[in-house]
């Protein structure tokens, strides 16, 4: 399939809005945008753009700004407006490392009526996880080979429960706190759900 890549400009906010059990997060996004505009904190253009991103309730929302902003400020604003937080954290890490194209969205369709053309296309067989990213020619073109598939925070183990700690206050070994195998030894049989 064909994927369409849009790199955020210094005068754009690009939001990746998730769905959820209570429906899309578009509602909170709109409320927060209203607060930002009414308070004069965000100077936005008269037109913005809204596209379904593929899954039910998920949206790509693009807010053109009247003036450019630093990458760090833009990415903080995107998170404030309910864009996906993991994406926001990665964007900040990329901006801080001066990685090219630190913020971007990948759409399964070209954005009809958008005010400018896409920045790249690719034909990767599936959605872009880190593995796909590292091999994707569009990612390499936009971010360079080294940064194309970079991850920043490590991979979470697929545990649904973690052991409950016996020590809940004061000094504790980092190994016991952070490594789930070590914590088994201190496990009193209770498990806490991972959410
Ligand atoms: Zn690709």
Image (cartoon, rainbow, N blue to C red):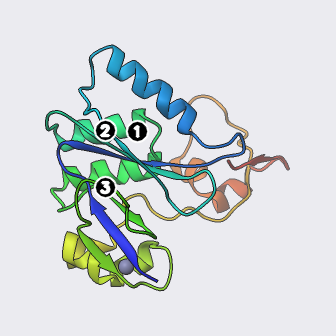
> Which quarter of the picture shows residue 28?
top right
Mark 3–mark 1 distance (CA, rounded to whole Å): 22 Å
Q: Secondary structure at mark 3?
A: loop
Q: Secondary structure at mark 1?
A: helix
- The residue wearing badge 3 is 114
- The residue wearing badge 1 is 79
Residue at 66%, 46% in the rendered image: 20
Horizontal side, residue 109 vs residue 118: left or right:
right
The reply to whether dot 1 and dot 2 touch (C-beta < 8 Å) is no
Is residue 21 visible in the rendered image? The answer is yes
- The residue wearing badge 2 is 47
Mark 1–mark 2 distance (CA, rounded to whole Å): 20 Å
The foreground one among 80 and 194 is 80
Disc 3 CB within 8 Å of nearest ligand 1 atom: no
Sequence-first tag of 1 and 2: 2
Residue at 68%, 36% in the rendered image: 167
User: Which residue is most to the right?
Assistant: 189
Sequence-first tag of 3 and 2: 2
Residue at 74%, 44% in the rendered image: 164
Horizontal side, residue 46 vs residue 55: left or right:
left
């Amino acid at each position: 399939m064909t994927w369409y890549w849009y790199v955020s400009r210094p005068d754009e906010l690009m939001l990746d809005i998730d769905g959820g059990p209570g429906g899309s997060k578009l509602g909170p996004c709109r409320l927060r945008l209203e607060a930002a505009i009414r308070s004069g904190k965000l100077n936005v253009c008269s037109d913005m753009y809204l596209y379904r991103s593929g899954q039910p309730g998920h949206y790509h929302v693009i807010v053109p700004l009247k003036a450019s902003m630093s990458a760090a400020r833009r990415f903080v604003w995107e998170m404030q407006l309910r864009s996906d937080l993991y994406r926001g954290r990665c964007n900040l890490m990329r901006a801080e490392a001066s990685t090219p194209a630190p913020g971007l969205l990948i759409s399964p369709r070209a954005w009809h009526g958008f005010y400018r053309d896409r920045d790249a296309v690719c034909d990767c067989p599936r959605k872009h996880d880190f593995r796909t990213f590292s091999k994707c020619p569009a990612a390499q073109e936009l971010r360079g080979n080294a940064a194309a598939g970079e991850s920043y925070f490590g991979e979470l183990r697929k545990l649904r429960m973690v052991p409950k700690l016996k020590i809940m206050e004061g000094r504790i070994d980092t190994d016991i706190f952070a490594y789930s195998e070590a914590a088994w030894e201190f496990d009193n049989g209770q498990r806490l759900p991972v959410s």
